[in-house]
Image (tube, helix red, strand yellow):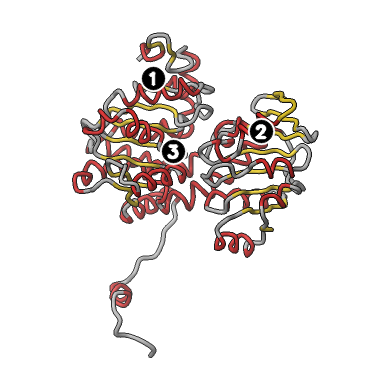
Amino acid sequence: MADCANKGAMRFVASTDAATVAAGCDRIEWADRDMPVLASIRERFARERPLEGMRVCACLHVTSETANLVRTLKAGGADVVLCASNPLSTQDDVAAALNEHYGVRTYAIKGEDTATYYAHIDAAIDQRPHITMDDGADVVGRIHASRTEVLEGIIGGTEETTTGVVRLSAMAADGALRYPIVAVNDARTKHFFDNRYGTGQSTLDGVVRATNRLLAGRTLVVSGYGWCGRGVAARACGAGMRVIVCEVDPLKALEAHMDGFRVMPSVEAARECDVWITVTGDINVVDEAEFLAMKDGAIVCNSGHFNSEINIPWLEASAAERRTLKPLVEEFVLENGKRVILLAEGRLVNLSAAEGHPAEVMDMSFANQALCAEYLVQRAAGLAPGVYPVPDELDDEVARLKLASLGVRIDTLSGEQRRYLMSWQMGTV
């Protein structure tokens, strides 16, 4: 696969040297040790080959955990092409290992510019996929906007992020979505664990790696109290931070309050903020008013999929001075003299400055991805274009496999108990 490294004048992976490939293989195997559910699916896929003949275009974060998903899809018979879903989340040694050792065409370079990012997506789409897999719906958006010639062969897709599901739901509501997509993000075994425990730990890991700042005693502002926000707030509280939650949903705001966190409008929170983390999936959550109200030296970062959550164009246009203090740490001095510290260009700080979610939680998320690919092969012909939930039986199977891998046993309902739950005749006795 060495020819993939240089196609024309464009590099498709950062390096293909033997040392880089070996390092990537080691990293992939290390993650695999903590992904027993995916490994069990891979073993079955290798026997049954349920994806035989399927071309899969996967636009995902190119990490060691993703590599093990790709290995599983390939074991099932799929021809997989992988490209990055974010310019800063690629692990270059993993990309090299996938290309050179595992024989998977991978188009991703950490730090690639926007033009290269979309050129890589186009290169993946050129394979004319039957199934798309997205983190953020960029492949789906690209196909529908400018690569419609490949639509005829696509049977379905999957989406793994909240941001992507929001985009796809909007497409479906507008009648623009042309094929069925399963919202893997909304599986219970995904958002209960990946979004909460994975995002919580990996986001704070990214902040600490980028800044080496002590968390204890500082004030953290979290924008958004969905599953990701819950995880960030809980982990920050455990690290000794004082947590403020900013929300627009009254129910989620009430939940944050009842969970013991302070809840207030974002401009008020800005006056107390030491570290600000956005996890909303929306645009300009941290905007001019928040920047102007911030304490001097406040750190701002994002763990949602796109960097649009922070109004970086305003920050760039309004800064009297701008400089890079260290890798992934940039200081903007505003006209009022206050300094704002932006981490990782506003991109996902957990993947840009750290290694993303631990393999243990990605095990369940990627198990869902693999099983949903199999489901699409079996059922897509009967699905109209739209966004679909992960079938409960697949979700339950992932949970069952995870419990088994942990050595945890649970009770089962007796026949009497099942009958009772399905009846209405018995009342107070």
Q: Secondary structure at mark 1?
A: helix
Helix, strand or loop at label 2? It is: helix
Q: Amino acid at mark 2?
A: Leu
Which amino acid type is marked by label 1? Asn
Measuring from the top left, give residue 274's x and y in whole percent: 74, 43
Q: Quadrant of residue 337?
A: top right
Real-space CA distance between mark 1 and mark 2, rounded to the nearest whole angstrom: 38 Å
Q: Residues within 10 Å of mark 1 (few under 14, many from 20)?
A: many
Q: Position of residue 119 (x, y in %)?
A: 41, 21
Q: Which mark is residue 315?
A: 2
Q: Earlier in the sequence, mark 3 or mark 2?
A: 3
**Residue 228 in the image: above or below residue 90:** below
x and y, in percent, of residue 57 in the image: 33, 30
The amino acid type of the residue labelled 3 equals: Gly
- Name the image quarter holding residue 340: top right
Instruction: Name the N-terminal-most of marks 1 and 3.
Output: 1
In front of the other: 54 or 314: 314
Q: Looking at the image, which residue is at 39% across and 17% down?
A: 100
Q: Which mark is residue 136?
A: 3
Residue at the spot 69% in from the left edge and 58% down from the top edge = 262
Question: Which is nearer the eye, 143 or 219?
Answer: 143
Say whether residue 78 is visible. Answer: no
